[in-house]
Amino acid sequence: MLKINKLHKSYPIGDSSLHVLKGIDLSVEAGEMVAIMGSSGSGKSTLLNIIGMLDEADEGEYILDNVPIKNLTEKKAAIYRNKFLGFIFQSFNLINYKNALDNVALPLYYQGLKRKERIEKGLFHLEKVGLKDWAHHLPNELSGGQKQRVAIARALAADPKLLLADEPTGALDTKTSHEIMDFIQSLNDEGKTILMVTHEEDIASMCKRIVRLKDGVIIEDTFVEQVRASQYV
Amino acid sequence: MNRTRSLLSGFTVAFAISLFAILFGIVNGLVNTFDSAFADDASNSIFVQSGMTSKASNGLQAGRRIQFKNEDQAWIKEEFGDKVQYITSRVYLNVVATFRNEKSNYSIRAVNPDHQYLENTKVTYGRYVNESDIKNKTKVVVIGRLVEEDLFLKTTAIGKYINLNGIQYKVVGVFSDDGGDNEERLIYMPISTAQQIYGNNDYVDQINLTYNPEMNFDAAIGFSNLLTKKMKDRFMVSQNDQRAIRVRNLANESKAINQFTFVLGFLVLVIGFGTLIAGIVGISNMMIFIVKERTKEIGIRKALGASPKSIVSIILLESILVTIIAGFVGLVIGMGVVEFAGPFLEKYFIKDPSVSLSIVVGAAITLILAGAIAGYLPAKKASRIKPIVALRDD
């Protein structure tokens, strides 16, 4: 599904540069649910951004679904992001003047789907996250948990191969966090491959595999017994 | 989106367009005033009049009276051929006209048939003086609309006989004229008839002609200068004598007015475009702010698969929309002012000011272009935003 070899990334800071990723090797199979952990500055967000094609590596190899991701033009990157990836952000990143349905349908618009089809698919995914009745509400009329569910519906709308979540529960209280994690687990049960960055141990333990980063290298990569979030809900 | 900012930036564009519409309307009104001042006569008219010589020449003393005759009109036509479009002579008379119990004084112009085109006379009923009238010296007249009103009251004049100083003339036509009431209180008759009855000679008071309209102003002025010179030679008048033969060419005046309106129109364009450019800069400035405000949204869209092209079109469309709405408001205000104030401006030589449809269409196209220009750089900037930078949580 996803294969990374000797990935390096550094950022220029003044005259010197900061070496953030120092040779990462990682391979993820379809259907996995991986937590990337590490303290701030460990490079976990940078790794996620490179996997999400929002950033490009300096060195190394990145193959996603048998497609080498290298020297992409803006246009090509846009097409790959739309086709392969679904993003879930800590701060939801919904467009605040568009209602829930329009937010969910946005990736479908960039796929070139007709309006009728977009609405149909958008409603289907909103129903999946249990917010069909909220389709015509603006984001500021929704609670944090509802917003994140709209964001998840949006990430799912284009039927991506890989879901990338950057601290998906970071802005939510414990109860809502567990509801969201329960939902993400159910998506994984259906076969979606999920990669998430988190610094919370209990959230990481709800994944099937934990990758720990420190100072730009992987220090631990273990498969764990998944804790089901449903027991807390 | 910041509405106040859009409103303020749009205001400049609206102001530019309304200013342009108002100025354009005023210039149009001025042009209309000039046009109506000359509506009476064909704009390519040349008038040739005679008087007393003021200088001695060729051994002849000053104070000699110059008298044009029929043969002079024929000579001009022969001498200048194609350069002359229409030509007529005029004899002036004053008569007392009576019909039944109505009686009044009128001026008569005895003319050739071409006179109708020179004077822009519009025959409303019947016909004008024709060649057969000239040849047969028929006793017919064409009377002005107000003459008919004065003498024939509510009845129609055509076919009836009118008495001019004791001689009966048949009314064969009634005319109207844009030159005003005085022009419509005239009576036209065949020049040959007048010459026979009132003088038994072939004297002519004035010769009017129009030059070939294919000539430009400079050629026309050259033509009338040559005509003046040749006429002076013909009558053995000194070339420096300004009184004996006077030639007035409307091309002189038309040329001055044309230049005047051209310069005015040019000034309006410069002012209008200058203000519009200020408006474009304003909107461009606003769009840069809007791109900054929407950076996060643009980042989200890119993460969801928006191509750079679609980002450009979002910003460009907003820019064009603001410009068009503002421009349209400006156009409506400007046209409203012109429409409303128009009737009160006639005493300032501004008649029927208006903004033509072609100007409106031109303005609309200019606005779309202006909006596109204003939005282009900010839109390009927006398309280069890196999603990772835009999405960074502050």
Image: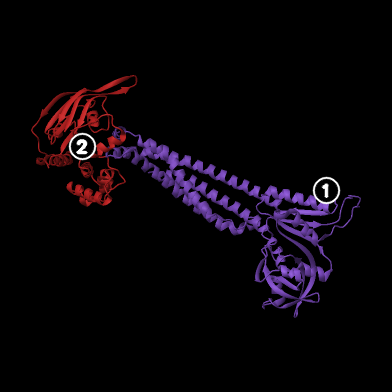
Q: Is residue B337 left or right of residue A51?
A: right
Above or below, B9 against B245 in this view is above
Image coords of residue B105 (percent x, y): 78, 71
* B54 up-or-down from A41: above or below: below
Bin the neighbour count of mark 1 within 10 Å (Cα to Cα): few under 14, some 14-19, many 20 and up: some
Query: Which chain does tag 1 point to?
Result: B
The residue singled out by tag 1 in the image is B239
> Along the line of sight, which residue is nearer the eye, B343 or B123?
B123
User: Please, what secondary structure does the residue beneath circle 2 have?
Assistant: loop
Q: Residues within 10 Å of mark 2 (few under 14, many from 20)?
A: many
Percent across and percent down for residue A208 are 11, 33
Label 2 – label 1 distance at C-alpha? 103 Å
Q: Nearer the viewer, mark 2 or mark 1?
A: 1
Give the answer, above or below, for where A222 lies relative to B344.
above
* Residue B297 visible in rendering: yes
Say which amino acid is labelled 1.
Gln
Q: Nearer the viewer, residue B21 or B236?
A: B236
Chain depicted in purple:
B
Residue ranking furthest to the left: A225
Q: Amino acid at mark 2?
A: Pro
Residue A114 in the image: x percent, y percent? 27, 49
Residue B256 can be seen in this image: no
Q: Which chain is red?
A: A
Q: Residue at x 60, y 59 (%)?
A: B343
